[in-house]
Image: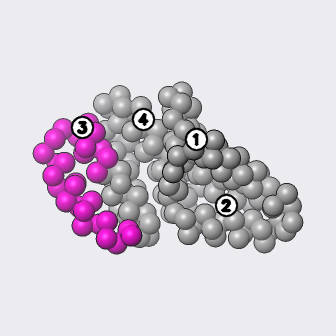
Amino acid sequence: ETERAIPILAEAERLASQWAATDVVRVFAAFWRAWAAYRQGHFAMAKELIASNADVARAGQLPTSLGHSLVTLARVELALGNVEEACTVVLEGLEIEVAIQDGWGIALGLDAVTFAAARRGRYEQAARILGATEAHRERLAVALPVLSRQENDSLVAKLRAELGVRCDA
């Protein structure tokens, strides 16, 4: 599905470029294009797009866009191997997401925390956060996409390999 979305997202970016950088259409176009780049493994492109969105959101005082951009940037930083930078930006992003009570943004941030914990070898904490995040998504009772289903599935497999039966307890 990502491959088919790329031309549409590129066209959305082109059309949105006529509006101010802080216009929601432009911010959304760049955000979703960054997600697609991430899913394709184009992490440098994803970082450029999402970091730019964060800068625009910060300057334009757009808390939802800033929170979403920061928690997504954390996942990009993790994909690039920058665990400490990921932790720094996810903390700022989660603070915003909690303050504005954005359930999806909170879930995105907790996803990043889960991956960071696993990357640091803290498998039990990662499993607990993963379970809590899934319960949070269920409570919201809406379809909330994850950044990469493949990465989530790989993480669950890694946690099961590391924790054995404790993983599903």
Q: Is residue 67 visible from the viewing direction of this image?
A: yes
Judged from the image, the secondary structure of the residue bearing numbered disc 1 is helix
User: Does residue 9 show up magenta in the picture?
Assistant: yes
Amino acid type, callout 4: Thr
Residue 151 inside the magenta-drawn segment: no
Residue 64: numbered disc: 4
Q: Are marks 3 and 1 in contact (CB under 8 Å)?
A: no
Is residue 14 rendered to the left or right of residue 149?
left
Q: Residue at x 81, y 61 (%)?
A: 168
Q: From the image, tell me which residue sits under label 2.
A: 119
* Tag in front: 2 or 1: 1
What's the amino acid at mark 1? Leu
Nearest to the observer: residue 58 or residue 11: 11
Please, what is the three-letter code of the amino acid marked with disc 2? Arg
Q: Estimate the spatial distance between the alpha carbons at disc 3 and disc 1, rounded to whole Å.
A: 27 Å
Q: Which residues are magenta?
A: 1-29
**Quadrant containing the C terminus in the rendered view:** bottom right
Q: Earlier in the sequence, mark 4 or mark 3?
A: 3
Residue, x 22% and y 55% (percent of image)? 12
x then y, percent, for residue 94: 56, 38
Residue placed under numbered mark 3 in the picture:
23
Q: Is residue 4 left or right of residue 101?
A: left
Residues under labels 4 and 1: Cα distance? 17 Å
Secondary structure that dominates the magenta span: helix
| 26 relative to 119 in the view: left or right | left
Is 24 in front, or is 72?
24
- Amino acid type of disc 3? Asp
> 10 Å neighbourhood of mark 3: few (<14), some, or many (≥20)?
some
In the rendered structure, find residue 2 and report the number of the disc placed on it. Answer: none
